[in-house]
Amino acid sequence: MNTTNTEATLEPSFKLKGSRVTITILELYEYDYATFNDQLAETVRSAPDFFQQTPVILSLERCKDTGFIDFIELGELCREYGLVPVAIRGGSEDQLLSANVAGLPHLPINAAKPPEAPEPKKEPETVAAKNLVVTTPVRSGQQVYAKGGDLIIIAPVSAGAEVLADGNIHVYGPLRGRALAGVSGDKSARIFCQSLEAELISIAGSYKVNEDLQKDHWKKSTQASLTGDQLIVSAFK
Amino acid sequence: MSEIIVITSGKGGVGKTTTSAALGTGLAQKGHKTVIIDFDVGLRNLDLIMGCERRVVYDFVNVINGEANLNQALIKDKRTDNLFILPASQTRDKDALTQEGVQRVLEELKKDFEYIICDSPAGIEKGAFMAMYFADRAIIVTNPEVSSVRDSDRILGLLQSKTFRAESGLPPIEEHLLLTRYNPERVDLGEMLSVEDVEDILAIKLLGVIPESESVLKASNQGAPVILDTISSAGQAYDDAVRRLLGEEVEQRFIEKAKQGIFKRMFGGR
């Protein structure tokens, strides 16, 4: 009876294979519990479907801190938001050690960069612009609101229509209705239009009505901005 | 292929029913089987303008409610072949128009007619919505004055958002501007908006300009669509509009002030 022989005749219970998988990299620039927590919460809130037990590699190549990072704490925080750190990449000696303690293996930098692999999707960085582009006339009685961004209208805005934006408003056509920019309080918002014929324009609550507007730059290509609390309308040369 | 055309304006009294009667008659004269539906339930007028008020037995609401079938309610026009009228009910109100009912009647008419003209009531209430909801094309009747233009603008906004085509993501309703009661002399005097002013504000293509004309009132009172009055400028203008509607290139007329006759020029009379 030879045990070695018996084992050799058994079917193998596993096989090791090389494979290439696309995985999200969490590139850490610096680590501070509170800031990291806040930003992670914000990121997850904007794309909740993306973070469902998603494995990530913590990249420390661009990390400004070279000192000790508590990877046990960081790992718990990540898992709380649906991210599962599986390894670290790069990092200093100290960081390697603490990662080791947290049970995170270390990937060498070049091995982690396969030459032809497509760039993994960096979801948090490609935030969709919240600007709104309107290509048909905004008619009397209609209201268009660009929440959280700019409103760009490539058509006339009729008298009796109302266009609003948290950011700037651009009207490539006559502006005959009401335009309210910076409605959530952004005082740096501006209103641009090809022909100023508005009933009212307002930036962050400061406004001018038709009567005041008719005095200057009427039917001219203009912009309006705030200087202090004063709404200034100026024509383009 | 049949097409549903709504004649609408927002404002009352601008000439929607006159236009519905004239364009419907014009389309039928050119050999297209046409029906005009009066959506102004409770304020039935189309039958008067078409001169068939004494022949109304059943109406649109009766058909919607299943109290009569379409053939019983449709009135064949006596003057023009291929033309039928579906009158409104005078004793009911706009709530009698249900979306399902209107759709069913329109579907049935589509089997038989090339053009279905929906004469919309004024306002932006239920009757007007029902008239525009299933339309493929819209003719916006506008008078050259600011309140009418403002109301037309409002209607255009609703056509783009509150119709079957808009709600189901189909190509948008094709919009045409018909400027009625136009008087070039008064435009020159600055009493009336010009064609350019109205086109600039509404930004839709111009189907035609119908000049202010005594023949329109006369035609209404006689119960004969003004397009049948081929001598009148309004009748001719409507005929031009029908041809444009059918895709013909017809030059715009009646926009300029009429040229003074030789005697007037010689003697300087007014």
Image: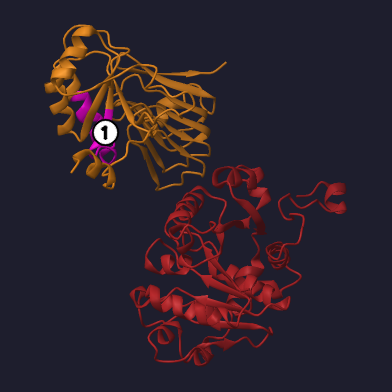
User: Left or right of B11: which side holds A34?
Assistant: left
Side of B95 where B197 appears, left or right = right
Q: Position of residue A5 (x, y in %)?
A: 25, 41
As drawn, the chain in red is B
Q: Quadrant of residue A48?
A: top left
Horizontal and vertical percent position of residue B140: 55, 58
**Res. A228 visible in picture:** yes
> Which residue lies under the disc numbered 1?
A55
Image quadrant for the C terminus of chain A? Answer: top right
Which colour is chain A painted?
orange
Q: Nearer the viewer, residue B110 or A68?
A: A68
Q: Compare residues B100 and B118 and report the one nearer the observer.
A: B100
Residue that extends furthest to the front in the rendered view of this protein: A1
* Magenta segment, prevailing SS (helix, strand or loop): helix
B97 in magenta: no
Secondary structure state at the residue bearing disc 1: strand
